[in-house]
């Protein structure tokens, strides 16, 4: 049986807000939204090189 990981409610809300801000403010397309099973953080890839990482507590930061 496969066990699935799900984002926390605060991660989900932060992800939605970051995607909205990224597409409306920076006018960048979202290419990937992925839940990393290793640390259960959400990773967003927008445009050619903008990465955003959202931790389980909803804190986010830009990634290189």
Image (cartoon, helix red, strand yellow):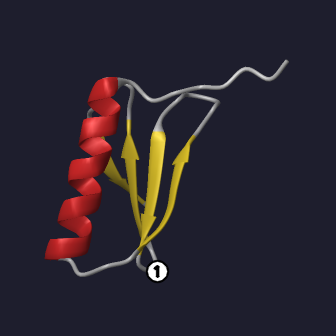
Vertical side of 6 occupied by 33: above or below: below
Q: Which residue lies furthest to the left in this view?
A: 25
Q: Check the picture and name the quadrant holding the C terminus.
A: bottom left
* Dot 1: element: loop
User: Residue 22, how many percent across, how many down?
Assistant: 24, 67
Quadrant position of residue 36: top right
Q: Residue at x 53, y 29 (%)?
A: 40
> What residue is shown with label 1?
48
User: Residue 28, how many percent across, how many down?
Assistant: 31, 79
Q: Relative to residue 63, is residue 40 drawn left or right?
A: right
Vertical side of 22 occupied by 4: above or below: above
Q: Which residue is drawn at 66% across and 25% down?
A: 4
Q: Which residue is drawn at 64% across and 30% down?
A: 38
User: Residue 33, how many percent across, how many down?
Assistant: 49, 54
In front here: 60 or 19? 19
What is the number of callouts on the image?
A: 1
- The crowd level at tag 1 (other Cα within 10 Å; few <14, some 14-19, many 20+) is few
Quadrant position of residue 55: top left
In front here: 63 or 52? 52
Vertical side of 30 occupied by 1: above or below: above
Q: Check the picture and name the quadrant holding the N terminus.
A: top right
Q: Residue furthest front?
A: 1
Q: Which residue is drawn at 45% across and 74% down?
A: 49
User: Residue 32, how many percent across, how many down?
Assistant: 52, 62
Vertical side of 60 occupied by 10: above or below: above
């Amino acid at each position: 049986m496969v066990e699935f990981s799900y984002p926390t409610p605060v991660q989900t809300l932060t992800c939605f807000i970051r995607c909205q801000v990224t597409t409306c403010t920076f006018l960048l397309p979202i290419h990937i939204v992925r839940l990393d099973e290793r640390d259960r953080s959400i990773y967003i890839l927008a445009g050619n090189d903008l990465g955003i990482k959202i931790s389980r507590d909803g804190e986010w930061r830009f990634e290189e």
